[in-house]
Image (cartoon, rainbow, N blue to C red):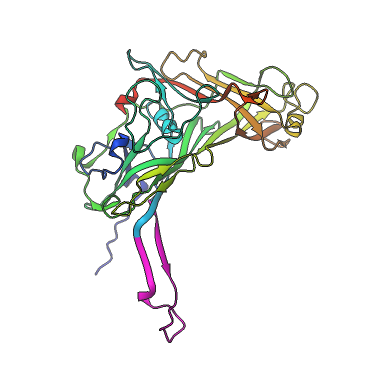
Amino acid sequence: MAVSGKVYAKSDFSVGIKNKNATAFETAASNSAAYELLPVINVSAPVLNLVESGEIRSNNAGMLELDTDQFRTTKGGFITMDFEVPAERDMIVRMLANVLQDHTCDESGSAPFIHTIQSTSGAVLARPDFTGTSATSGENIGIPCIFDIGLYYPESAQDKMITSAVLQSLTMNFDMADGRCLLSGTFYSGMAGSSKFLVEQTLSANSAAPTLMSTSPTQIESYFDVKKLDVDGTALADMVITAVSFTFENNVARVGRDANGDAESYAFGIPSVNITGEISLMYDANFDFGSGGNVLQDFISGNTATLKLQQGDGTVSTAGEMNIECEIYSTAVNLDPNADTGAVITIPFKVVQPTSSGAASGTAFKFEYADSTPSTGW
């Protein structure tokens, strides 16, 4: 056979996702579904984590395992797939809602719709029931949230489909150098059987192309009108930040094995959901190593601090406005006196639930965002 000589680039591949109700957890992804395009920067292939083993047996006269000693099955396996995308206005909420399985929104009126994802002493993160019905109104609307994923390849009959995936991890990085918010993470599916992870497919809907989440996408920029942090017992003080990021990990795992070996549910948040992050800020009169603004003393004392970031005036009433509030516990304090922008303090942290008199009190993490898309339109 002669060499083909045809070379493909990342722009020849596409990734589409489709939200579906949790009652369809065991329903295979469809090749005629209207998948919505993920604006991936770097394309990753799905990674199959299969059940396999092999060992030399007593009836083998040689020292190498036989081919018949090898065992591999898709039943009981799982699939992961990494991605990186620029955060867009009509997409960021559904990604955060998926990784934390938490979401509220008043959809009784018209746009803009105010979405809230939070964990507080009065509204703690609850483990979702992936065998139940996704909420259609009120608290946790659209949750549990699962995705089918369509992978569009440049040659015919080579597409792939992943069934009932959830985000295992998600990083929200406000990249000041790039100027925009970037999302990266990993999809996870416990549907690795041949009837749920489908290969050699032709995705026929919409002339074999996924639709756009928005025909006029608006990328989320890396800036904040309000940037405040309290340290060393002081009230919230203004800061100049050079970078900030959050990483959400839910420790999702497959549970059970049906007749096809696929997951019967997902275990979520065991032992916990982890939210970590890192913030870099200028070493100045508000944040330093002296009394009243000592970031190092806060770390040594094991104190927590409230972090507030806002895009907009704080009301979250206009499309594109965002509020982030969380209680952070620093895990290190680093100083870079050689940074191009001047001396920079970097604080890696984890998000924790604040307490009062030993009892949970206040806000651990709260994300509010206004856009033009209700969750019923996801």
Q: Nearer the viewer, residue 130 or 68?
A: 130
Q: Nearer the viewer, residue 369 or 100?
A: 100
x, y percent for residue 176: 55, 31
x, y percent for residue 358: 66, 26
Residue 61 lies in the magenta-colored region: yes
Q: Which residues are magenta?
A: 46-73
Q: Name the image quarter holding residue 342.
A: top right
For image coordinates 53% across by 41% down, the residue present is 271
x, y percent for residue 360: 60, 25
Which quadrant does the N terminus fall into?
bottom left
Is residue 303 something that shows in the picture? yes
- Considering every residue shown, the one lying at the far bottom of the view is 61
Query: Left of 229 or right of it: where is 190?
Result: left
x, y percent for residue 113: 38, 18
Q: Name the image quarter holding residue 344.
A: top right
- Considering every residue shown, the one lying at the far right of the view is 291
For image coordinates 45% across by 26% down, the residue present is 220
Which quadrant does the C terminus fall into?
top left
Residue 51 lies in the magenta-colored region: yes
Query: Left of 33 or right of it: where is 310?
Result: right
Q: Name the image quarter holding residue 145.
A: top left
